[in-house]
Image: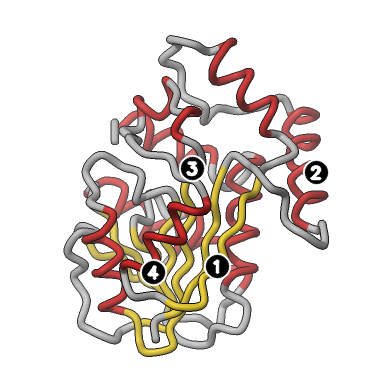
């Protein structure tokens, strides 16, 4: 990923509505986990920092390919960060009770099947995998090209990937569905051909409104049938 995009992520991930919505869902998916957690492709460490504040009982580890991002993640989160690839995780078998991979398997430099096999390897039996991916290939945009995303998934495809990698009890759902129409308009009409990143400061009133919409959706009793992202939770047998 371009170094400038890491800088934008570092500045935005503690406050921007989308990161806060994502991190809240990742934390929800880790409820009940007691042992060490790996953030595979941790970027500049925003989720690990949130996890430190919300779950100080957990041992936290991260792996990140970009050297500067890995250093920033360690500084920001206080977690143990190792430089490496999700295609060949630098950890022993059966090391973690949970592993998180948020918007990483979509990157051009990642082989999804290899990465999922590696995540399976480093999880302990009964360990929990949490994966977030951008949804729908037709939503691929200038922002995706900027951050080197080459794939977006349906929930059905994510379920099949998990089964092929040997995971069981998949719970796969879309989220950011209430904002999906606005997302489609922004990406396919308004910003068509625009190389500006989607990660940017929002006016406070707009940021608060967008985050409130994601929180309303998060509290719905049933998941929506479509959304801008796919969140999957599964287990290693």
Q: Residues within 10 Å of mark 4 (few under 14, many from 20)?
A: some
Query: Quick one: SS at disc 2?
Result: helix
First-in-chain label (2 vs 1): 1
Disc 4 from disc 1: Cα separation = 28 Å
* Nearer mark to the viewer, of 2 and 4: 4
Q: Earlier in the sequence, mark 3 or mark 4?
A: 3
Camera-side mark, 2 or 1? 2
Packing grade of label 3 (10 A; few <14, some 14-19, many >=20) is many
Secondary-structure class at tag 4: helix
How much space separates mark 1 and mark 3, taking CA atoms?
Answer: 22 Å
Q: Residue at x 63, y 59 (%)?
A: 25
Residue visible at 80% across and 35% down? 209
| Residue at numbered disc 1 | 51
Query: Relative to residue 139, is residue 224 drawn left or right?
Result: right
Examine the rendered structure and indicate whether residue 81 appears above or below residue 198: below
Mark 3 to mark 4: distance in Å? 19 Å
Foreground: disc 4 or disc 1: 4
Q: Which residue is mark 4?
A: 163
* Element type at mark 1: helix
Crowd rating for badge 2 (residues with CA inside 10 Å; few <14, some 14–19, many 20+):
some
**Rounded to the nearest whole Å, what is the CA distance between mark 2 and mark 1?**
21 Å
Q: Front-most of 47 and 49? A: 47
The quadrant the N terminus occupies is top left
| 19 shown above or below 200 | below
Mark earlier in primary sequence (2, 4): 4
Q: Residue 134 got which mark?
A: 3
Disc 2 target residue: 212
Describe residue 235's horizontal placement relative to residue 224 as left or right.
left
Which mark is first along the chain, 1 or 4? 1
In front here: 52 or 231?
231
């Amino acid at each position: 990923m371009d170094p400038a995009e890491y800088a934008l992520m570092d500045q935005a991930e503690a406050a921007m509505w989308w990161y806060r919505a994502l991190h809240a869902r990742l934390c929800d998916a880790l409820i009940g986990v007691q042992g060490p957690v790996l953030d595979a492709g941790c970027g500049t460490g925003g989720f690990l920092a949130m996890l430190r504040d919300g779950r100080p009982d957990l041992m936290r580890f991260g792996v990140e390919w970009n050297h500067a991002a890995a250093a920033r993640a360690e500084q920001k989160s206080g977690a143990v960060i190792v430089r490496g690839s999700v295609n060949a995780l630098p950890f022993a078998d059966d090391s973690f009770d949970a592993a998180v991979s948020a918007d990483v398997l979509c990157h051009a430099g990642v082989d999804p099947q290899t990465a999922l096999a590696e995540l399976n390897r480093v999880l302990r039996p009964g360990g929990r995998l949490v994966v977030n991916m951008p949804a729908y290939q037709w939503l691929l945009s200038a922002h995706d090209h900027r951050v080197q995303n080459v794939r977006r998934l349906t929930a059905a495809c994510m379920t099949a990937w998990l089964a092929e990698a040997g995971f069981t009890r998949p719970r796969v759902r879309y989220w950011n569905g209430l904002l999906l129409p606005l997302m489609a308009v922004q990406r396919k009409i308004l910003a068509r051909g625009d190389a500006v990143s989607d990660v940017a400061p929002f006016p406070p009133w707009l940021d608060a409104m967008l985050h409130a919409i994601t929180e309303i959706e998060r509290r719905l009793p049933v998941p929506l049938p479509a959304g801008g992202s796919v969140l999957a939770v599964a287990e290693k047998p």
